[in-house]
Image: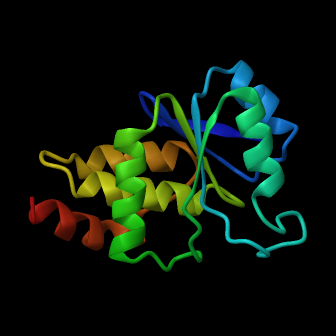
Amino acid sequence: MQIHQLEPGFAIADALTPGDLEEVARLGFRAVICNRRPGEAEDHPDDCALSAKAAELGIEWRCIPVTPGEYNDADIETFGRALDGLPTPILAFCRTGRRAVHLWAHARSREPQCNIPMLLTAARAAGHDLEERRAQLEAAAGQN
């Protein structure tokens, strides 16, 4: 498990196992967002074991499953509401962290006074290049 902080109170990670959630709790995360789809891989038949372990540890669990690269307005809005409504710090994950960083950037780009260069820099520091999404992020930021 590799965790990368993108902003205060929010970080992303690659695929988690139920055992990883103990470390997540030890690190102080109060909420987890799963962006993996049920059955997408043998190591992720569904989120039942993960959500049960999170509940056992007192971690709030939210599942927002998305297909890599295919994020619609409802997915982005749901992720944004989770960012605003879940207790922090929040950890979002998928198989590699890419979906989590994309949804974070798209949700944040819709906020007033969004700093697109900051989003790109934070994503790059976490090992994810958002340049191919820059125009979409800037367009969303321009609508604020």
Residue 8 place in picture, x, y as percent: 41, 27
Residue plotted at (79% across, 75% down): 39
Relative to residue 135, is residue 95 drawn left or right?
right
Residue nearest the viewer, comparing 16 with 125: 16
Q: Is residue 120 visible?
A: no
Residue nearest the viewer, comparing 132 with 40: 40
Relative to residue 85, is residue 32 drawn left or right?
right
Residue plotted at (60% across, 27% down): 29
Residue plotted at (90% across, 71% down): 42
> Relative to 14, is 142 above or below?
below
Residue nearest the viewer, comparing 120 with 48: 48
Residue nearest the viewer, comparing 51 with 32: 51
| Image quadrant assignment for residue 103 | bottom left
Question: Where the N terminus falls, by quadrant?
Answer: top right
Residue 141 place in picture, x, y as percent: 17, 60
Residue plotted at (42% across, 48% down): 82
| Image quadrant assignment for residue 68 | bottom right
